[in-house]
Image (cartoon, coloured by chain):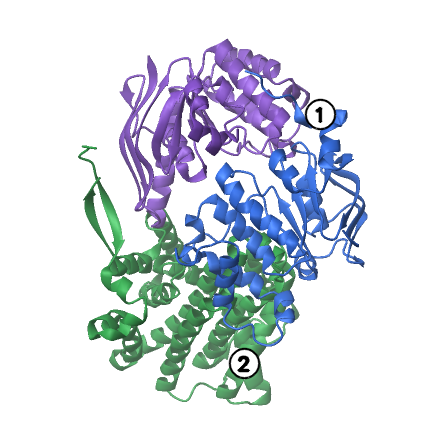
Chain colours: A purple, B blue, C green
């Protein structure tokens, strides 16, 4: 059963096409991967699914800047959410962990996590908080450290933890391994796999350097210049020679 | 390898109770490529900021070509020949690629060394871009910086330093975010720079690519130096393995 | 792909593309496309004194002063990244220096004004110099405070005429000189600024606005360039002040009035930040408007603020940006 069904999605920034007729699905309970280089459209896809792009569109309209056009449909749990406000989408369980983390710099780790849980009930928050600390023991030590003073890896852990606090049904991770050391890449991909196994949360990951992520992904799509050029199970992708050389450095 | 170009002695810096860099010392010899690696938060970028004047150290000394540059302003240090790239790049988006280079072309260092008229700065900029692989026929130098793919942007950032005809370029995670094919367009440029006599310091996470280039590697951890040596030695160091490398996923 | 989706596309007009290169000189139509708007602006401004009655001619002069301030504000804010809230300090320093030169030394206005322009700009720049190194918001705050400081100092120390000011200064020869002097300076300043921002120095300023770390790392001393920019903006502001003191033949603390700081901002936002000409036109619209509402006294500042807020909320880009877009580009529906 697909929780997320993207159909014929097209996104234009003024006259430049950012997402070109993309069709993709995210099966319930699975980890789906979206791979591609920088200008392939991964982040635009994440912004569109989470709804942030509507906010950007409004701001650009006011400023007289680029006109952003969004066409197609995004079915979430059977409902077309393409015009739904991002806050509404969050209430329905679509939670984005943004590119480059975007944690609250001046708030402590604990405060960041609590803010994430603002949509949840107290009981849910407490339970999830405990889970986050077992998932990332390092964060437990750093409870009162200000976000801005965390290292990149710790910030990423915090960002994912904060997303979990919002009780996601569809967790969107935009380049979670960006700029991390090999050791941290492993720690984080283990954690992501754990989240999916333990909590059954449907996850959609956009990543560039796919090597550590590919083993934990069930199904993947490869984007190039805004269009989906390849799709398949992680095994099929790993076996594909183009994919191997272009993205995985194998 | 020759003289010592850069000496960093016992550099320390704390930000609000967090010790970012503690007692780091290193030397850079002319002509080499020095790699600096380490986990996030190990102080790599802070070290660069301290050496190039963007942050004032709490203690320690930085000497460049025999001159004490500790605490000098960034533009003065750049004019002496010690340049750096930025990890999070924001080129002047709406300007065309070659116009991004007009700014360093107006620095005192460039104006000094080009005795008399530099000539039309626009065409000098375009020539420099062509040298580093921005195809003139495809009009790449004329495209707006915001529209260029990341591989070009990273090279543009290098070009910003190259224009100054520096002695040293410190590259802050120049491979981050690049695909394999983009990396293979940047590596030849770095090799060419070394051949042209420019000394490089490379801060990197992409170890495989870094070790192809670096002569010597330093490992930082929690703001302190953990290990130093040639790439092979460092990879075998147990402390380094525990702190940074982890193990390869077997699945 | 059989989606029947449509989107609105915005494209440059072909005539715009043709006129971007030397081909602009190949036909009257193309040259017209480039020259007509500029010609209309210049001719329009220069013809105004001939068609206005005496009262409105005076308003024109005042509008011109605000136009210079708006131009300076737009330049600093959009081309250098400095938000200067202290237009009143330029007017005050230019006005006081010019008036004092006239009152104490008896120099004629046409000599005082140039001297005061340069001297006033020097003083203003010196005063703002310390905060150029700091983050932008401190520059805004300090520039805002200085006119207030100046007023308090003048009153407290009772210098330069104190609260009463100095009257009976020499005024400009006749009403034609009054108007064409200010209009001439405005047109000159408009073209000068436009030229300046297209030169290398303009690129450096824009670099300072976008990403000053990268500019520093490129070996360029940003404080030196910011200082130059402030000095140039101060030149036209101080000219306005010097001109004003000889327009009415009087100087006083009202030369440091808040109006001079606020109205140019409203005019800039309304006219279109970044267009340079938009703020000038905005000033020529707001000033007569505020004249009409003279009866409301201090409430006029409330008017400026309301206009400012209205534009920021509904049309932040300002009318000139909209007009330029309509002139250079067209829209059409395109099937995707």
Please give the residue where the numbered disc 1 appears in the rendered image.
B241
* Mark 1 vs mark 2, CA separation in Å: 74 Å
Instruction: Decide: is A244 above or below B183.
Output: above
Q: Quadrant of residue B196?
A: bottom right
| Quadrant of residue C320 within the rendered picture | bottom left
Mark 1 surroundings: few (<14), some (14-19) or many (≥20) residues within 10 A: some
Residue C255 in the image: above or below residue C213: below
Residue A115 shows in this picture: yes
A169 above or below C208? Answer: above
Q: Residue C255: horizontal and vertical position, in percent?
A: 50, 70
The subunit carrying tag 2 is C
Q: Quadrant of the N terminus of chain C?
A: top left
Disc marking residue A75: none
Chain letter, disc 1 residue: B
For label 2, the residue is C98
Task: Give coordinates of residue C126: x percent, y percent.
Answer: 63, 68
**Front-most of C133 and B221?**
B221
Determine whether the residue tagged by mark 2 lies in a helix, strand or loop.
Answer: helix
Residue A8 in the image: x percent, y percent? 27, 29
Q: Is residue B116 left or right of residue C318?
A: right
Identity of the residue drawn at 34% across and 66% down: C281
Find residue A166 and report its horizontal and vertical position in percent: 47, 20
| Number of numbered discs | 2
Quadrant for residue A137, please give it: top right
Residue C153 in view (yes/no): no
């Amino acid at each position: 059963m697909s929780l997320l069904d993207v159909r014929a999605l097209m996104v234009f920034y003024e006259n430049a096409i950012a997402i070109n007729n993309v069709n993709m699905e995210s099966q319930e309970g699975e980890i789906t991967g979206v791979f591609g280089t920088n200008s392939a459209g991964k982040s635009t896809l994440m912004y569109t699914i989470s709804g942030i792009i509507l906010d950007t569109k409004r701001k650009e309209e006011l400023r007289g800047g680029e006109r952003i056009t969004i066409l197609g449909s995004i079915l979430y749990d059977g409902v077309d959410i393409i015009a739904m406000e991002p806050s509404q989408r969050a209430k329905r369980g679509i939670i984005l962990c943004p590119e480059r983390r975007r944690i609250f710099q001046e708030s402590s780790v604990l405060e960041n996590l609590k803010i994430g849980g603002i949509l949840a009930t107290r009981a849910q928050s407490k339970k999830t908080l405990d889970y986050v600390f077992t998932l990332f023991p390092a964060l437990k030590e750093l409870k009162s450290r200000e976000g801005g003073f965390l290292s990149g890896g710790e910030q990423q852990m915090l960002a994912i933890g904060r997303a979990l606090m919002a009780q996601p049904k569809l967790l969107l991770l935009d380049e979670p391994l960006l700029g991390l050391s090999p050791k941290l890449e492993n720690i984080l991909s283990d954690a992501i796999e754990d989240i999916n196994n333990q909590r059954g949360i449907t996850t959609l990951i956009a990543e560039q350097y796919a090597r550590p992520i590919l083993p934990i992904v069930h199904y993947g799509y490869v984007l190039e210049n805004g269009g989906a050029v390849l799709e398949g199970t992680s095994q099929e992708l790993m076996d594909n020679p183009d994919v191997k050389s272009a993205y995985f450095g194998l | 390898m020759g003289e010592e170009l850069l000496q960093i002695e016992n550099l320390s810096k704390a930000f609000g109770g967090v010790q970012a860099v503690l007692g780091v010392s290193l030397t850079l010899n002319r002509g080499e490529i020095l790699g600096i690696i380490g986990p996030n938060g190990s102080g790599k970028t802070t070290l660069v900021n301290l050496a190039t004047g963007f942050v004032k150290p709490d203690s320690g000394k930085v000497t460049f070509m025999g001159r004490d540059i500790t605490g000098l302003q960034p533009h003065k240090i750049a004019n002496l020949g010690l340049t750096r790239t930025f990890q999070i790049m924001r080129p002047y988006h709406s300007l065309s690629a070659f116009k991004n280079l007009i700014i360093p072309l107006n620095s005192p260092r460039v104006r000094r060394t080009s005795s008399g008229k530099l000539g039309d700065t626009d065409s000098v900029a375009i020539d420099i871009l062509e040298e580093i692989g921005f195809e003139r026929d495809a009009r790449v130098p004329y495209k707006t910086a915001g529209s260029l793919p990341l591989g070009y942007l990273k090279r543009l950032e290098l070009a910003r330093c190259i224009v100054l005809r520096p002695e040293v370029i410190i590259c802050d995670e120049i491979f981050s975010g690049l695909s394999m094919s983009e990396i293979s367009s940047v590596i030849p440029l770095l090799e060419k720079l070394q051949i042209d006599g420019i000394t490089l310091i490379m801060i990197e996470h992409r170890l495989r690519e870094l070790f192809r280039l670096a002569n010597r590697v330093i490992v930082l951890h929690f703001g302190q130096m953990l290990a130093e040596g040639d790439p092979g030695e460092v990879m075998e160091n147990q402390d380094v393995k525990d702190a940074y490398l982890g193990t390869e996923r077997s699945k | 792909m059989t989606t029947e989706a449509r989107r609105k596309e915005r494209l440059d007009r072909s005539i715009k593309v043709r006129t971007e290169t030397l081909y602009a000189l190949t036909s009257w139509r193309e040259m017209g496309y480039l020259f007509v708007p500029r010609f209309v602006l210049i001719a329009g401004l220069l013809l105004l004194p001939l068609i206005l009655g005496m009262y409105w001619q005076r308003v024109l002069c005042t509008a011109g002063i605000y136009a210079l301030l708006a131009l300076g504000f737009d330049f600093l804010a959009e081309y250098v990244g400095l938000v200067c809230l202290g237009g009143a300090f330029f007017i005050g320093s230019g006005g006081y220096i010019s008036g004092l030169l006239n009152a104490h030394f008896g120099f004629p206005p046409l000599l005082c004004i140039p001297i005061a322009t340069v001297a006033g700009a020097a003083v203003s720049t010196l005063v703002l110099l310390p905060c150029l190194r700091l983050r932008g918001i401190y520059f805004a705050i300090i520039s805002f405070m200085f006119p207030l400081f100046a007023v308090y100092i003048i009153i407290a120390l009772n210098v330069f005429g104190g609260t009463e000011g100095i009257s009976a200064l020499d005024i400009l020869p006749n009403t034609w000189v009054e108007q064409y002097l200010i209009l001439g300076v405005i047109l000159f300043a408009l073209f000068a600024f436009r030229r300046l921002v297209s030169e290398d120095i303009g690129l450096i300023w824009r670099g300072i606005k976008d990403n000053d770390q990268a500019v520093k790392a490129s070996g360029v001393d940003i404080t030196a360039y910011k200082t130059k920019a402030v000095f140039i903006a101060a030149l036209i502001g101080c000219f306005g002040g010097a001109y004003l003191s000889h327009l009415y033949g009087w100087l006083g603390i009202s030369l440091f009035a808040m109006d001079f700081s606020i109205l140019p901002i409203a005019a800039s936002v309304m006219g279109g930040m970044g267009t340079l000409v938009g703020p000038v036109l905005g000033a020529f619209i707001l000033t007569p408007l505020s004249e009409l509402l003279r009866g409301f006294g201090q409430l006029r500042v409330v008017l400026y603020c309301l206009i400012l807020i209205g534009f920021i909320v509904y049309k932040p880009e300002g009318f000139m940006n909209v007009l330029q877009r309509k002139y250079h580009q067209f829209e059409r529906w395109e099937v995707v």
